[in-house]
Amino acid sequence: MTKKRKSKSNYKVVCEELSLVLFVRGFSLEEERDLYLKIRQKIETADSPVSVEEYKQFIVTQFLEESKKFLSGLPNDVEESNEILDSAYQSIVGVYPPFSLEFICNDLNADTFFKGVDSSVLRHVNAAMGIDVSQSTLPIQLSSIEDIINLEEYLSDNIVGQQHSIKALVKSLKLLASGLSKHSAFLFVGPTGVGKSQLGKMLGEQYSGNYYKINCAEYANAHEYAKLIGAPPGYIGHSEKSVLGEKAEASNRWVFLFDEIEKGHHKLYDFLLSLLDDGTCTDNLGNVLDFSESIFIFTSNQGISEIKRDPMGFDRGAEQVTSKVTREVIETSLKKKFSPEFLNRLDDIIYFNPLSKEHVKEIAKLQLEELPIQITDPLLSFIVENGYSDEYGARNIARFIKNNISIKVADAILHKLVPKNDPHGLYKPRIIEGEVKIVGTEKYQASSL
């Protein structure tokens, strides 16, 4: 659990217009966020529009030390009073930009959570969830050690139980960051539902913002790989732009994930050889497609079925793929399936471990953080016991949460029910007769500033 950061005492802000030094209160990040959500909610749910002057006075009251003394000293002349108030307000939002009225209005206008449902209820839930659509995850340049450290931290926070795999991936990516390599290729090997595809997707979001997944089961026949580069002359669709042609027009910096590569035809592997050599290939129209700064990831379950698994291996599964004997079994299976030319073009083969019970709990917790619901131990245990399977790994967790928990929260929202007596505005779950129930709610009542 993150420790709450202490509040700063105050900021000394020079307000030139008033020839004053204003003492602005200091807030910790948590306090600042809570106050922002409180103000955002009050504006959004107010019965009548909030005036600009009223909002500025409210900000001065919240942020300015000795605000009562400041406000009581305002002149009786309305115009002059508003000018002084505006100067103090501008000084405050200079220190805390997100609290400017323009920023909050833009935030509210961009809000699209649960379109079509009663807006007042959704506003209440949005504020409680802490949704801030003004902040987005931006791609990193991956050109310095700081970028590498930030990437590793991000992946470690969002991919559970695969720290070894993340470290192996980040180690290889240092070549890209240093400029010694422009493109990379990795083979992710491990059981189903342990985070191989998810890691590839998150890497794509962080590396360039360009991510594309290719399901290799759709390329099981010899001719189907042509969908990537376009149909040959004389065939229907020859003049149409290919899948990779469209991607190359957008950027040469992608993360391509070839999912379940072992299901593709060997002609697909032959096509990939030139792409992995220098990051380029030629489409059906003779155009050279440039992916010279791209990362190619291949996922596979190859060899996993050949591993003799301990029937009680749910909790011991993390040891299964890391052992030398197990890796040898997988490597032998890979050599039987893929040609030496293909394997030799890979920068690294990265092994993913099965998940333990505690790992699955962490995954469930990450999934639940997207919902306005209290995360309790009974709820997590309920999800693990009913949503996890050895066959599909954690892949069923998201589906189970959606069908058994998210739907209950959605039902409460649609019935205009909001959490009662909860300072964070989170719905309270309870397991009753093997089913999740939302308890402790009340009909939504609008409030004003």
Image (spheres, rainbow, N blue to C red):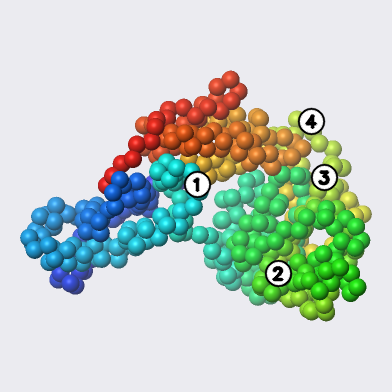
Q: Earlier in the sequence, mark 1 or mark 3?
A: 1
Of residues 149 and 189, the one nearer the viewer is 189
Task: Say which residue label 4 marks.
Answer: 311
Residue, x 85% and y 58% (percent of image)? 219
Task: Say which residue label 2 marks.
Answer: 247
Q: Amino acid at mark 2?
A: Lys
Q: Earlier in the sequence, mark 2 or mark 4?
A: 2
Q: CB of mark 2 within 8 Å of CB of mark 3?
A: no
Marks 3 and 4 sit apart, C-alpha to C-alpha, by 15 Å
Secondary structure under the numbered disc 2 in the rendered image: helix
Residue 196's spot in the image, x, y percent? Answer: 71, 51
Task: Say which residue label 1 marks.
Answer: 116
Of residues 134 and 304, the one nearer the viewer is 134
Secondary structure under the numbered disc 3 in the rendered image: helix
Residue 434's spot in the image, x, y percent? Answer: 60, 23
Res 267 visible: yes
Residue 435's spot in the image, x, y percent? Answer: 59, 25
Marks 4 and 1 sit apart, C-alpha to C-alpha, by 48 Å
Q: Amino acid at mark 1?
A: Gly
Residue reaching furthest to the top? 433
Q: Earlier in the sequence, mark 4 or mark 1?
A: 1
Give the left or right position of residue 181, taking residue 419 as reference.
Answer: right
